Image (cartoon, grey):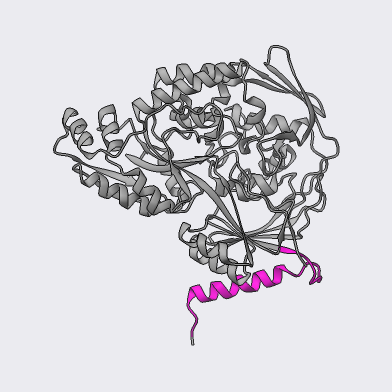
Amino acid sequence: MKKTRSQLRKLSTLGFLTGALMVSGAASAKTLVYCSEASPEGFNPQLFTSGTTYDASSVPLYNRLVDFKVGTTELQPSLAERWEVSADGKTYTFHLRPGVKWQTTKDFTPSRTLNADDVVFSFERQLDKNNPYHNVSGGSYEYFEGMDMPKLIKSVEKVDDLTVKITLTRPEAPFLADLGMDFASILSKEYADAMLKAGTPQKVDLNPVGTGPFVLQQYQKDSRILYKANPSYWGPHPKIDRLVFSITPDASVRYAKLQKGECQVMAFPNPADLASMKQNKAINLLQQPGLNVGYLSFNTEKKPLDNVQVRQALNYAVNKEAIIKAVYQGAGEAAKNLIPPTMWGYNPSIKDYGYDPEKAKALLKAAGLEKGFTIDLWAMPVQRPYNPNARRMAEMIQADWAKVGVKANIVTYEWGEYLKRAKAGEHQTVMMGWTGDNGDPDNFFATLFSCAAAKDGSNYSRWCYKPFEDQIQPARSESDHQKRIAYYQQAQVIMHDQAPAIIIAHSTVYEPVSNKVIGYRVDPLGKHHFEEVDLKD
């Protein structure tokens, strides 16, 4: 019988995974398979903002000057072994770890170890529009721009081979934590120069060379990614020899693979499967409150969403509690603020928009839209930690809005295309969400809803509102913690009243892991780390 394409693909994958167990003829090599939810957008975390891409690039392949201790929001030395901050808070001097080796790949064999030139290049590519790499691979530095880094960073200078000085235009309270984030990953200047000379600069972003615990060996889009442990890693050597990402968009299929032992860790389970997972003695179901938020952004540049009454009406029209029950199934709580209640600066006094269709109709009438209107509602094609079933959520919002005369057409695209089009502002409303990157409220407010992020970053509401800016911008340079709290609590009042989005839920993060896995920890920053993980024999 002739096999279908999907059957052949499955056999190919099984053959690949079986072959991956053999390393230099040694059948005892340890291979961990992670069932991931989607393909990465690329392998340079400077250019993208999705957790899927970070899991595949910045986590296994790269390091930063400072990194977060796995499983925490605690900073620790990484490529910089120590640093000093000037008394005025504007100058950071980093002393690099000596002897850090770059990875050797089929495209590149390094001739030197990490030095200050690599750090300067990694920041100047994003900072300097005249840098020869600035426009390579599209030249879109959404995170860097959205955090207003071009205005914050005055200069990045090499003092000597192992010393780098970063000078800011103003003090910035969360700056050190910002440097632990994915966009601040350090790339090899020597590799970049070699690829530029060869006329293939885009290879830097497609065939990565890092200093991280794993080396990329093979990538097949929508199928798998294969890594091997980095034999020259400067930190503790990974306990596993091979790491495989088995790209599996359907959560039910991921769970089936986990049950069959075809993967040992899976991303984003269906809430409906949690009860079964808890009963399965072969699975450890790890959980913790998520440092996250799921929301629906209104494109405030497009009518009628430029009218605050319309945005408020659409908030009142949504039965948030019904969504929590049906979509999150006990694994989430209704959100009234952008930041979760576990984060410092949270404002508990905000009164959420209740479910009130009559009030919604009154506001639409006041806006001159008593007859309703038609609108596009973009739904994510993938599961995220902050949204386990975007399609179901979209259908529920669609039904709620229909009750107040608003007809919603549900739109979706492949994940990379979805993000690209949303960044370009093609949407009217778009389902989004966020998992915190550094434990600071600035990482939510400035990254997602600042004026800078509206122009070049992750502000999909394209909302630029001066009274809001007047709270979040001073908070960034304020060293007094209590004053920062006051700024952020007032920012939440303003954001609630202006309603640039429907803030829907904060989820509990569940991660099912085979009981053969040792040392895996849930990351509060939403990533999947395997550098410290081992497998039972």
Q: Give residue 523's quadrant in the image.
A: top right
Q: Find residue 66 and report its horizontal and vertical position in percent.
A: 72, 34
Residue lying farthest right? 99
Q: Is residue 298 left or right of residue 256?
A: left
Q: Is residue 298 left or right of residue 84?
A: left
**15 falls in the magenta region:** yes
Residue lying farthest top? 88
Asked if residue 281 is positioned above or below residue 90 in the image, the reply reads: below
Q: Find residue 335 and report its horizontal and vertical position in percent.
A: 43, 38
Which span is picked out in magenta? 2-31
Q: Give residue 494's quadrant in the image.
A: top left
Q: Is residue 88 left or right of residue 269?
A: right
Q: Residue at the location (65% across, 70% down)?
A: 16
Q: Find residue 246 and report its horizontal and vertical position in percent.
A: 59, 62
Residue 142 in sight in this render: yes
Q: Residue at the location (38% across, 28% down)?
A: 496
Residue 413 in sight in this render: no
Nearer to the camera, 387 or 421: 387
